[in-house]
Image (cartoon, rainbow, N blue to C red):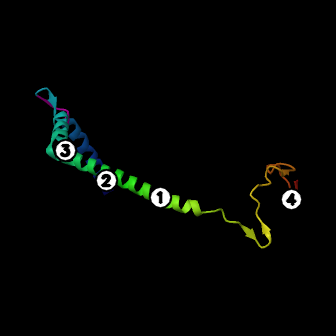
Amino acid sequence: MGEMIFTLKCFVYAVVFLFVLQIEIGGRSLDDRMTSFASNSPVASMIGEASQGGARLIQSGYRQIKSWLKQQFASVGSSWSKPDISFGSAEIASSSRSDKVKPKRYLDEPSEEVLEYEP
């Protein structure tokens, strides 16, 4: 019950605060004054410059990693060949038989018997 009262108090305080911010003094609301102060303050410009520097750092790092990976895979890719997969004496063919094998009937049909395939 205490959490519910705390939540209601916070809601009431937020509503009162929003109403107070709508008070106009000299033709401008307190909300407008606070917004312009926050966006034009020296702290906001420093934070903006820091975030731009961080974005440039991430972009530069991404480009360097991308070029390094391209070089690594280019050198490996030229000598890399497709391995032959085999199970004992049977080898897996590269062409599938899915286009040649057709089921006798659909799996959606109810049946007790095992489905057989015609080649």
Segment tinted magenta in the rendering: 21-25
The residue tagged with tag 2: helix, strand or loop?
Answer: helix
**First of labels 4, 2 by sequence position:** 2
Q: Is residue 18 left or right of residue 42?
A: right
> Residue 21 at what x, y percent from top left?
19, 36
Nearer to the camera, 9 or 50: 50
Q: Residue furthest top?
A: 27
Residue at (15, 29) in percent of width and height: 28
**Mark 3 vs mark 1, CA separation in Å:** 39 Å
Q: Which residue is mark 2?
A: 57
Q: Position of residue 79 (x, y in %)?
A: 58, 63
Q: Position of residue 50 (x, y in %)?
A: 23, 50
Location of mark 1 (residue)? 71
Q: Mark 3 against mark 1, which lies toward the viewer?
A: 1
Q: Which mark is residue 45?
A: 3
Marks 4 and 3, the one that precedes in the sequence: 3
Residue that badge 4 annotates: 114
